[in-house]
Amino acid sequence: MPLYNSPVSQNVKYLFIDGGCLDSLLELFSENLFDKKQLEINYLQLVWNYHKVFYYDCLPAQKQGENEADYQNRIKPKIKLFNHLKSLDRFHVYEGTARYRDKRRGQEQKQVDIMIAVDMLTHSFRKNMDEATLLTSDLDFKPLIDALVQDGMYVSLWYPKAKTNYELVDAADSRQVLTIHTVWRWFTDNFQKQVKLPVLSQSSFPPIDNSWTQVNKIKQADYEVFFYEKEKKYAAVLQTINGDYNLYQHNNLEQLNFYIAHIYSPDVIRKDII
């Protein structure tokens, strides 16, 4: 009898997580939607249907001029995360190294990409898995995905919305874009109660009356959005292709602006085909 709820699928599925990519995605949402709160993630919800999960990351490098006490305090959250993941069934954490170059180039990871490539190729060669999923936005992994696909492995890619090169996305057999709504499902129940996303309502007629004041208008290639304010509440209105209206309401204009740009931006930015 297993000690954890095993995945429903009979196919053996392994998930490989580029921790740096996942961290960047969570930080993006924390800063722009949730007032820089530490996001509370239920990692078992993230990986519920995978037989094994491999997480790769490294501790932040010590910056030039940073004293040891400040450095140790800065890396405590990352150490806590690594220890938490190591305690979860099916999770395996592998740490690379990092070094701080300078203020312009920032931190440089070492070994992480190589470890991911070696492990994915090894598990594929040994037929340990029937399907491999890679969470990353790094185009450097395209040759790895190409090699796995050509070897007969079914490869799925999880990638951040509007942050990933189309060549990497196209290389995979299947792909899942990671949006704020994807990440929302990973939040703990307690954290979901603490934070709010813009609320959507739909109508067949313009949903804003004269009691609202227009404060901004943004026109992009794929959409046009009007922002309104009333009594310190904010609304964004977009007309759909079938003539109906989507109304989003939120209590923070900057967060609402980010949310609309995030939701309506293309999943992948492609070059024009000549």
Image (cartoon, rainbow, N blue to C red):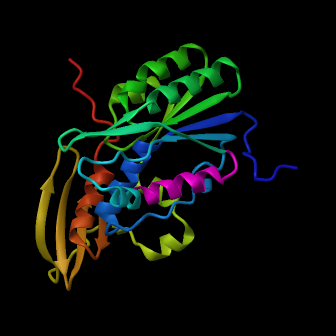
Q: Nearer the viewer, residue 82 or 248?
A: 82
Up the image or down, 241 lies above or below 126; here it is below
Up the image or down, 242 lies above or below 120; here it is below
Direction from residue 102 to residue 16 in the image, left or right:
right
Q: Is residue 200 visible?
A: no
Residue 195's image quarter? Answer: bottom left
Up the image or down, 143 lies above or below 19; here it is above
Q: Residue at x 35, y 58 (%)?
A: 29
**Range covered by the magenta-colored residues:** 75-90
Q: Residue at x 45, y 42 (%)?
A: 58
Up the image or down, 4 lies above or below 171; here it is below
Residue 209's image quarter? Answer: bottom left
Q: Nearer the viewer, residue 125 or 59?
A: 59
Q: Main secondary structure of the magenta part?
A: helix
Query: Residue 117, image x and y in percent?
Result: 51, 25
Query: Residue 251, image x and y in percent?
Result: 28, 76
Q: Is residue 187 visible?
A: yes
Q: Nearer the viewer, residue 233 or 209?
A: 233
Q: Residue at x 45, y 76 (%)?
A: 194
Is 53 inside the magenta-drawn segment? no
Query: Residue 3, image x and y in percent?
Result: 80, 53
Q: Residue at x 62, y 50 (%)?
A: 86
Q: Nearer the viewer, residue 61 or 35?
A: 61
Q: Residue furthest bottom?
A: 231
Residue 72's image quarter? Answer: bottom left
